[in-house]
Image: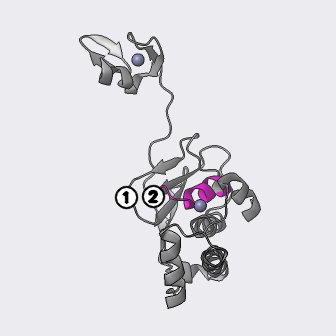
Amino acid sequence: MKTLDQIVEFHGHICPGLVLGYRVSMLALKELGERAEDEELVAIVENNSCAVDAVQVMTGCTFGKGNLIFRDFGKQVYTFIKRPSGDGLRIAITWESPPETGEEKKMWEKYMRGERSDEVIKAVHDRKSRKIDAILHASDEGLFNIRKGKMDLPEEAEIYPSLRCVACGEKVMEPRARIKNGKIVCIPCQEIL
Ligand SMILES: [Zn+2]
Ligand SMILES: [Zn+2]
């Protein structure tokens, strides 16, 4: 299992979103088994937040392999499905950060106005650390709404032949090629031609 340090190294910083993704992925691996070397596990993510980087590192469901599917719904929902069985796990984040104190709110407002004094930086940093801590120590039930069962598998990633765009001469995979005035073009050339 990948460590939180390895995930932070990939993502670039530690933040509450990343740690939520870490907890989501831990649960997915606990319930569904190993990290995906190929496409034996598929993740469907409904946002493109920091959490998704943790999902990629931990579960091996990555953008490049095609077993990370992004549905742009703006929801904190992560679904994992095993191939070929269709055994799935849907995790919706229900966790809410503890309410800010009046002092924290004041500091945050200063930060948003661009103030970077030691006092403001420390307050913002402490608040973030407390959130991260709370996420790391919460129970799964305290973080998520979890549903298990058989789920529909999305199509497997396919390999397509390439065509050559007559305008720029570069290759483009067939389903993305367009026909303009009877000629094969790529999407960027279609838009400028
Ligand atoms: Zn982040
Ligand atoms: Zn082109």
Secondary structure at badge 2 equals loop
Viewer can see residue 144: no
Instruction: Find residue 31 and report its horizontal and vertical position in percent.
Output: 62, 67
Residue on which disc 2 sits: 47
Bounds of the magenta segment: 45-58
Q: In which quarter of the image is the C terminus?
A: top left
Q: Which of 192 and 2 is in front in this view?
A: 192
Q: Distance between the residues labelled 1 and 2?
A: 6 Å
Give the side of residue 57 with respect to residue 179, left or right: right
Indicate the amino acid at tag 1. Phe
Instruction: Determine whether label 1 and label 2 are within 8 Å by CB.
Output: yes
Picture layout, residue 7 above or below residue 139: above
Question: Can you give x and y, in whole percent of width and height, for residue 165 in the image?
Answer: 41, 14
The residue under label 1 is 73
- Decide if residue 128 is on the left or right side of residue 159: right
Residue at figure coordinates x 49%, y 83% from the top left: 105
The residue shown at (45%, 58%) is 47
> What residue sits 42% from the left and 54% below the top?
152
Which element is circle 1 on? loop
Q: Which residue is more in the foreground, 193 or 170?
A: 193
